[in-house]
């Protein structure tokens, strides 16, 4: 009798047709699970704070200030908008399978161009004109920073992952160098002298939120309904197919990468003109990398990405509020909860896409019996 | 399916916009008295008090002041690691107000200032205090004040201790100083330190090395070692780590520390120290909220009002050091000793290419201009600060502005 082949205890298979209701259930369970996981960690740090976490989480959306009741919500939406803006900028490149990991640097160069122009534009220039000039410069700055890797990718097929990653550090170096020269006593450039975005309804950041909201729809439309969007997805699926179909792949690669960089530059402008009013080598604050995660976890769907970005901002600010109340304002705590959140979402995605089979003994025996016959 | 997504997204959005318009008509109240038990203090630190001596010094002071005035621990809300190079300080401040109901906000880093001012303008009923900033006297807001301390007084006393030690050691009478940057804050400190030493040891000289960082243990240690190899007999520093004290311990050279007395573990080389004590200032801050009083735009902590402390002498100090320091401290307190007395030092043009000053035939300052108003683009030195033979440090604003390299001090590049 032949000996049965040894089978592993578990094996996984790809799930092809998950019904819509199951998708929704799994995703909702994922998010709820993520929050519970975060709350458990809170109680680990300080016993008995399980429900306080939820209180602070939802409390971070509500402002106690009588004159600015929406400020907390807007601050959360602002953080969400910056993250979402960057992940939207990465989206066309990612759809083309051009792995742009240089968002951090492209955002920085955009912000830096805006801040630099604000420094040199004459004070007599109307603010609106200065704003437009700074915006154009920021978009150009981000575009140039992705143009270089794109040209090398298109003509020499170099690895864009490493190239764009490297450009991040070049951007940081460039900015540090200029700050040393222009403002040696400080770690940032001077506050903008012109081109700051105004408050709306007494709230900062409203323009940032509006711009990114428009971008969500624009990007959805661009990818779904335009010729460009179709071409870049074909190039992403197979460059050879694209060539046979008569698509000029070089121009598509360069065009899409430049668009990605330009939109990163736009976010850089939002950060500098709409929030920080200055620039430093840390202005992007790691959002360029978090944006990559959000694009992936959002399944490259602008609306789902918006939801993930919202949750990231929500958890970050909620746990920061929790830390202020219970952990002496520890700034590392939000990093722990956000890592748990991402972990939970990843686990959820895994169960959406794969099925785990447990190989029971009886089955094995049955199998073995069949073989014996 | 996609259309539905878009629709619900739009619906949520329009709801938000509606709420925003409805809510934007609330009225803004001004400052008013706050009962002691209703005070909620929001503290914004650049670093983490558990690892940074700079932030630790603030935390000790605020908790000490609260305890003395009978406030409870849960009236303090903190945000640590708040970056000073982006808008984080603004967000931290408004979050402390919005979600915790804080009515007093204190920020501790120079770079927080612009963002804290933005929050102060938006929250007229909340009091804002900022340590080390420069803009309160030009912004003229009812609810925003700067504070610093004339730490040069403490440095001077530490310098006296160093000078006494040089007299005992004999030899070249040379001091060494590890500075973070060549900023006024650092220069003002080491000049006072040097003048303190000079008051008891007339032929003293001093070498200064910069590390270009506020906290880099390796660079500070290396700079101290280089100074010792260059003949420095006593080392002091203006930086946040234990790099220089450790190098001094290894070489057996006396050390004078800053912010924290580097005594424990350094018993054989600890000579003296100085620090800013914010406790008194924070008590003023809390009391002013209770009594609805205005704190001046610039508060300067001094030796006389307890804002500056130099209260420890190590066992390696020369005989008579405690007495000499006490005499100098008394003279500073009663005003008879002016530290930046222009007859006590000389300045030459070749060491100060960017300085704006005039001197008499012997090199003593007649006039000097400083950058007091930090608002102008070019950081121009617009204010004359020598009055009645004294360079009036910290008189025009709380943050230091003395930035001349005086004779006897050499910057080693």
Image: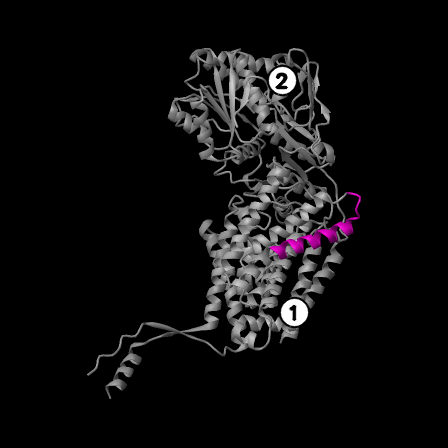
The percent position of residue A284, horizontal first and vertical second, equals 59, 51
Q: Which residues are magenta?
A: A123-144
Rounded to the nearest angstrom, the CA distance separating label 1 from label 2 is: 67 Å
Residue A75 shows up from this direction: no
Q: Nearer the viewer, mark 1 or mark 2?
A: 2
The residue located at (53%, 58%) in the rendering is A101
Q: Residue at x 51, y 22 (%)?
A: B207
The vertical placement of A316 against A229, above or below, is: above
- Front-most of B133 and B401? B401
Circle 1 — which element? helix
Farthest residue, direction bottom: A373
Q: Which chain letter goes with mark 2? A: B
At horizontal 67% and vertical 11% (from top left) the residue drawn is B361
Q: Are marks 1 and 2 on the same chain?
A: no
- Position of B280 with respect to A136 (left or right) is left
User: Which residue in the protein does label 1 denote?
Assistant: A222
Quadrant in the picture for the C terminus of chain A: bottom left
Residue B227: x percent and y percent?
46, 24
- Considering the whole magenta stretch, tell me its main secondary structure: helix
Q: Residue A276: x and y, percent?
A: 65, 47
Q: Position of residue A211 (x, y in %)?
A: 69, 59
In front: A373, or B105? Answer: A373
Chain on which label 1 sits: A
* Residue furthest left in the image: A1
In the figure, is residue B251 to the left or right of A202?
Answer: left
Does any portion of residue A161 appear in the rendered image? yes
Membership of B118 in magenta stretch: no
Label 2 neighbourhood size at 10 Å, few (<14), some (14-19), many (20+)? Answer: many
Q: Quadrant of residue B116?
A: top right
- Which element type, helix, strand or loop, lies under badge 2? loop
Name the residue beneath numbered marker 2: B347
């Amino acid at each position: 009798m032949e000996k049965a082949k040894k089978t592993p205890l578990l094996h996984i298979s790809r799930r092809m047709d998950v019904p819509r209701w199951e998708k929704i259930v799994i995703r909702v369970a994922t998010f709820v699970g993520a929050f519970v996981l975060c709350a458990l960690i809170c109680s680990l740090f300080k016993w008995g704070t399980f429900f306080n976490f939820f209180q602070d989480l939802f409390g971070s959306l509500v402002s106690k200030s009588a004159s600015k009741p929406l400020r907390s919500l807007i601050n959360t939406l602002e953080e969400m908008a910056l993250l979402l803006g960057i992940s939207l900028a990465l989206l066309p490149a990612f759809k083309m399978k051009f792995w742009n990991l240089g968002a951090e640097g492209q955002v920085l160069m955009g912000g830096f161009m805006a801040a630099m122009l604000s420094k040199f534009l004459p004070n007599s220039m109307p603010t609106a004109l200065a704003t437009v000039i700074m915006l154009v410069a920021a978009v150009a700055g981000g575009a140039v920073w992705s143009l270089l890797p794109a040209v090398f990718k298109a003509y020499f097929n170099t690895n864009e992952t490493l190239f764009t990653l490297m450009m991040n550090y070049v951007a940081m170096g460039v900015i540090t160098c200029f700050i040393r020269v222009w403002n040696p006593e400080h770690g940032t450039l001077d506050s903008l002298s012109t081109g700051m975005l105004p408050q709306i309804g007494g709230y900062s950041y409203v323009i940032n939120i509006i711009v990114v909201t428009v971008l969500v729809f624009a990007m959805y439309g661009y990818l779904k309904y335009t010729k460009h969007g179709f071409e870049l997805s074909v190039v992403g699926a197979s460059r050879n197919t694209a060539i046979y179909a008569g698509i000029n792949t070089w121009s598509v690669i360069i065009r899409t990468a430049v668009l990605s960089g330009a939109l990163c530059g736009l976010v850089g402008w939002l950060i500098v003109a709409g929030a920080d009013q200055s620039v430093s080598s840390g202005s992007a604050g790691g959002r360029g990398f978090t944006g990559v995660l959000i694009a992936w976890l959002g399944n490259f769907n602008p609306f789902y990405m918006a939801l993930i970005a919202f949750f990231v901002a929500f958890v970050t600010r909620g746990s920061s509020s929790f830390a202020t109340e219970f952990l002496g304002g520890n700034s590392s705590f939000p990093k722990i909860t956000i890592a748990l959140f991402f972990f939970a979402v990843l686990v959820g995605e895994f169960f959406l896409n794969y099925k785990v089979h447990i190989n029971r003994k009886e089955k094995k025996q049955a199998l073995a019996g069949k073989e014996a016959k | 399916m996609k259309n539905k997504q878009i629709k619900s997204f739009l619906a949520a959005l329009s709801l938000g916009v509606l709420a925003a318009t409805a809510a934007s008509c609330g009225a803004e109240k001004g400052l008013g008295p706050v009962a002691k038990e209703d005070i909620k203090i929001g503290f914004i630190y650049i670093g983490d008090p558990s690892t940074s001596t700079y932030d630790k010094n603030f935390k000790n002071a605020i908790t000490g002041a609260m305890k003395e005035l009978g406030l409870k621990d849960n009236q303090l809300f903190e945000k640590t690691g708040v970056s000073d190079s982006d808008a984080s300080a603004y967000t931290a401040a408004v979050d402390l107000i919005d979600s915790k109901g804080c009515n007093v906000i204190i920020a501790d880093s120079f770079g927080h200032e612009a963002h804290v001012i933005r929050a102060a303008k938006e929250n007229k009923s909340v009091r804002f205090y900022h340590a080390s900033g420069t803009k309160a006297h030009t912004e003229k807001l009812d609810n925003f004040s700067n504070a610093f301390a004339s730490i040069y007084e403490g440095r001077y006393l530490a310098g006296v201790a160093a000078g006494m030690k040089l007299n005992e050691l004999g030899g070249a009478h040379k001091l060494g100083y590890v500075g973070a940057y060549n900023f006024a804050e650092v220069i003002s400190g080491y000049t006072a330190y040097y003048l303190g030493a000079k008051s008891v040891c007339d032929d003293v000289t001093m070498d200064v090395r910069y590390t270009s960082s506020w906290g880099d243990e390796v660079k500070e240690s290396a700079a101290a070692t280089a100074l010792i190899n260059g003949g420095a007999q006593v080392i002091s520093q203006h930086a946040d780590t234990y790099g220089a004290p450790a190098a001094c311990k290894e070489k057996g050279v006396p050390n004078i520390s800053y912010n924290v007395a580097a005594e424990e573990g350094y018993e054989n080389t600890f000579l003296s120290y100085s620090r800013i004590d914010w406790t008194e200032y924070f008590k003023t801050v809390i009391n002013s909220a209770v009594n609805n009083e205005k704190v001046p735009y610039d508060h300067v902590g001094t030796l006389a009002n307890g804002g500056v402390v130099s209260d420890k002498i190590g066992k390696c100090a020369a005989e008579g050091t405690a007495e000499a320091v006490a005499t100098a401290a008394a003279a500073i307190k009663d005003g008879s000793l002016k530290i930046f007395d222009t007859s006590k030092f000389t300045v030459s043009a070749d060491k100060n290419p960017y300085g704006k000053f005039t001197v008499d035939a012997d090199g003593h300052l007649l006039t000097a201009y400083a950058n007091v108003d930090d608002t102008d683009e070019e950081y121009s030195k617009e204010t004359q600060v020598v009055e009645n033979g004294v360079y009036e440090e910290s008189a025009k604003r709380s943050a230091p502005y003395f930035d001349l390299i005086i004779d006897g001090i050499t910057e080693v590049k």
